[in-house]
């Protein structure tokens, strides 16, 4: 131990980038490096299979410090604490209060109350906050846009009566009329005039924000990460511009705005998104020349996505939301909501809400995600992603600015078109399995039934009152359904009408027939078909007889490409139209088989959804 300064591994020379590339070239055996190993992201840039220190040479992000401008590494210096938030429907204030007090004892330290617009009153607020100490618990409120200012005034009166320290009140009122415009296409622009009043009303409460950008709505509509990020910045900037134009000083204006962002399953990219978001927002606010850099901090509440949640195999939603929660925590968000796993098909239960809370408590209390500030800093990969996302999102931001800003772009419908197009593309990708949804379009649970589960509609918070002039829809709206919805509808329809039986006629080459039978079972079970796999048959006649004895509606022949030339046509002829005949694969002899009258083939290039719809039609389902 005499020489403690000795460096390990000094006898090895570090290989150069070129040496790595040469080695990879050899391992690829002539395959194209660009095609095989470079990931072409949906975000508009490529991701390399490896990164080295020199890849960071020109990046500025690694030089930043936590808690300092431009806040790429988070708003805090001393810990990565975030608020564990749960949202509560407050249409019955007494019941909502009882629920809040209960969950505050179960690890929640941030509440989100949804108050119907026609119930905004001092009475409601007093009932709701009874026994809740707002100096120690974050409180967020959402209500009808028209009643938000009134709610702010009531809250101030209530807090003054309680004698609370204004600096210790943390939270928000989620006033955001532009959300309604972009989601529903309704013109509520007159309500924008409330914005400056809200900012002024709450300016003595430095940690309570009155205006919220809901870019999580884009995330839940299927937007790519870079779209959510670029549009969130444009959305925030639109509010900032409106406030400052109305005479609100920039420090007050910037400190009035909060961001509700979504989190999708793209683990490292989402960590990078939150880092890039703070970096870019800080640059935007800086252009308005605030007195204090603290005005440039972006406050983000992250909510795990509903877009990728599924109704079948719903416990898989826990795996999705768990990595999403991890991304948000490692990305240093201010607060977080984990969406309960049963959200697609029911009002959350006590069980699903408890699990959702515990998903956050687990990474906090057991994995200590709250102890380390920005643990991904210096990771060549995440630093590169942060920079690349920032670059691409900035292009989107500038494009919106060129169109006259976010509000003008909504009125023109360009943002809605962009997100709707992504949603359509993603549904198409899911249909072809270019985008995997475990348990839905890949490896479904063969025996699961829907048991009455149906897609659940969540309501809007305006107390159901329609205001004059809002019935017509002057702008484009965002049209979206969850990514799994098409497959779920098909599966439920099959289940309600008639569940066909698909029989695997496995014959010939052992490895190939097993692989093809497994592929075909997975393929057909996506529509809820009953599948019967088999160990193998000596002759096609034996297989067909067994299939008919099992009352099969579909017979899938599973063998090797070479053997199909020998087995497929005899099997088809012997079956003689007594059931539907399918060949597993796309063999070279396909044209010969088609000439003999065989028309159904399942293979990796198929559009799974369209093929299954077609089979349903042929089977009269």
Image (spheres, rainbow, N blue to C red):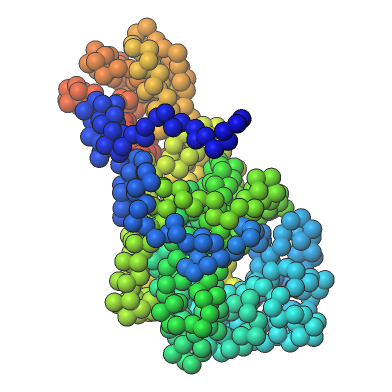
Give the residue drawn at x 44%, y 90%: 245
In the picture shown, does residue 434 fall above or below 224?
Answer: above
Give the residue drawn at x 66%, y 68%: 112
For residue 133, side relative to residue 65 (left or right) = right
Residue 317 drawn at (x, y percent): 56, 46
Quarter of image, res 509: top left
In the foreground, 234 or 184:
234
Residue 594 drawn at (x, y percent): 20, 27
In the foreground, 17 or 477:
17
Give the residue drawn at x 39%, y 53%: 385
Quarter of image, res 437: top left
Which corner quadrant holds the C terminus?
top left
Q: Is any part of residue 378 visible from this angle?
A: yes
Give the residue drawn at x 36%, y 78%: 405
In the picture shown, does residue 591 fall above or below 562?
Answer: below
Quarter of image, res 565: top left
- Total numbered circles: 0
Q: Outermost residue toward the right? A: 131
Q: Outermost residue toward the bottom? A: 247
Residue 560 drawn at (x, y percent): 30, 17
Q: Is any part of residue 500 visible from this angle?
A: no
Q: Outermost residue toward the top? A: 538
Residue 274 drawn at (x, y percent): 49, 60
């Amino acid at each position: 131990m005499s020489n403690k300064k000795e460096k390990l591994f000094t006898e090895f020379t570090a290989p150069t980038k070129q040496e790595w590339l040469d080695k990879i070239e050899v391992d690829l055996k002539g395959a194209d490096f660009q095609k095989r190993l470079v990931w072409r992201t949906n975000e508009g840039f490529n991701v390399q299979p490896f990164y080295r220190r020199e890849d960071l040479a020109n990046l500025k992000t690694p030089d930043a410090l936590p808690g300092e401008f431009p806040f790429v590494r988070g708003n805090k210096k001393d810990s990565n604490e975030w608020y564990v938030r749960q949202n509560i429907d407050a249409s019955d204030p007494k019941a909502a209060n009882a629920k809040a007090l209960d969950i505050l004892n179960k690890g929640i330290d941030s509440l989100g109350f949804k108050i119907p617009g026609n119930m905004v009153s001092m009475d409601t607020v007093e009932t709701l906050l009874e026994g809740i100490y707002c100096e120690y618990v974050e409180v967020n409120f959402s209500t009808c846009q028209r009643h938000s200012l009134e709610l702010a005034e009531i809250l101030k009166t209530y807090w003054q009566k309680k004698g609370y320290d204004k600096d210790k009140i943390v939270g928000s009122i989620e006033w955001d009329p532009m959300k309604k415009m972009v989601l529903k296409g309704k013109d509520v622009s007159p309500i924008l005039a409330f914005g400056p009043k809200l900012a002024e009303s709450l300016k003595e409460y430095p940690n309570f924000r009155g205006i919220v950008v809901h870019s999580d709505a884009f995330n839940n509509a299927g937007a790519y990460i870079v779209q959510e990020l670029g549009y969130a910045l444009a959305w925030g900037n639109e509010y900032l511009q409106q406030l400052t134009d109305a005479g609100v000083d920039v420090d007050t204006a910037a400190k009035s705005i909060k961001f509700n962002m979504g989190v999708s399953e793209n683990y490292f990219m989402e960590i990078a998104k939150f880092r890039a978001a703070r970096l870019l927002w800080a640059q935007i606010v800086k252009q308005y020349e605030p007195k204090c850099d603290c005005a440039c901090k972006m406050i983000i509440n992250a909510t795990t996505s509903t877009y990728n949640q599924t109704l079948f195999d719903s416990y898989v939603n826990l795996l999705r939301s768990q990595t999403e929660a991890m991304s948000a925590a490692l990305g240093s968000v201010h607060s977080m909501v984990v969406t309960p796993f049963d959200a697609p098909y029911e009002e959350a239960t006590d069980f699903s809400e408890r699990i959702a809370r515990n998903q956050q408590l687990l990474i906090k209390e057991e994995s200590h995600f709250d102890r380390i500030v920005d643990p991904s800093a210096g990771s060549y990969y995440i630093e590169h992603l942060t920079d690349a996302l920032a670059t691409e999102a900035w292009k989107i931001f500038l494009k919106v600015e060129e169109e006259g800003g976010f509000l003008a772009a909504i009125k023109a419908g360009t943002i809605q078109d962009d997100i709707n197009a992504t949603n359509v593309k993603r549904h198409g990708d899911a249909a072809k399995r270019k985008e995997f949804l475990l348990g839905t379009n890949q490896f479904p649970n063969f025996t699961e039934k829907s048991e009455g589960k149906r897609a659940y509609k969540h309501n809007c918070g305006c107390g159901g009152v329609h205001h004059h002039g809002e019935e017509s829809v002057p702008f484009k709206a965002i049209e979206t359904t969850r990514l799994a919805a098409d497959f779920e509808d098909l599966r439920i329809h099959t289940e309600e009408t008639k569940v066909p039986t698909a029989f695997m006629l496995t014959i010939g080459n052992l490895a190939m027939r097993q692989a093809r039978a497994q592929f075909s079972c997975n393929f057909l079970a996506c529509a809820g078909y009953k599948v019967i796999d088999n160990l193998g048959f000596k002759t096609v006649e034996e297989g067909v007889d067994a299939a008919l004895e099992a009352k099969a509606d579909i017979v899938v022949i599973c063998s090797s490409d070479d053997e199909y030339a020998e087995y497929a046509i005899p099997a088809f002829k012997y079956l003689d139209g007594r059931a539907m005949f399918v060949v597993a694969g796309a063999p070279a002899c396909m044209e010969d088989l088609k000439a003999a009258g065989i028309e159904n083939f399942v293979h990796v290039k198929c559009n799974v959804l369209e093929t299954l719809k077609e089979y349903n039609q042929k089977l009269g389902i």
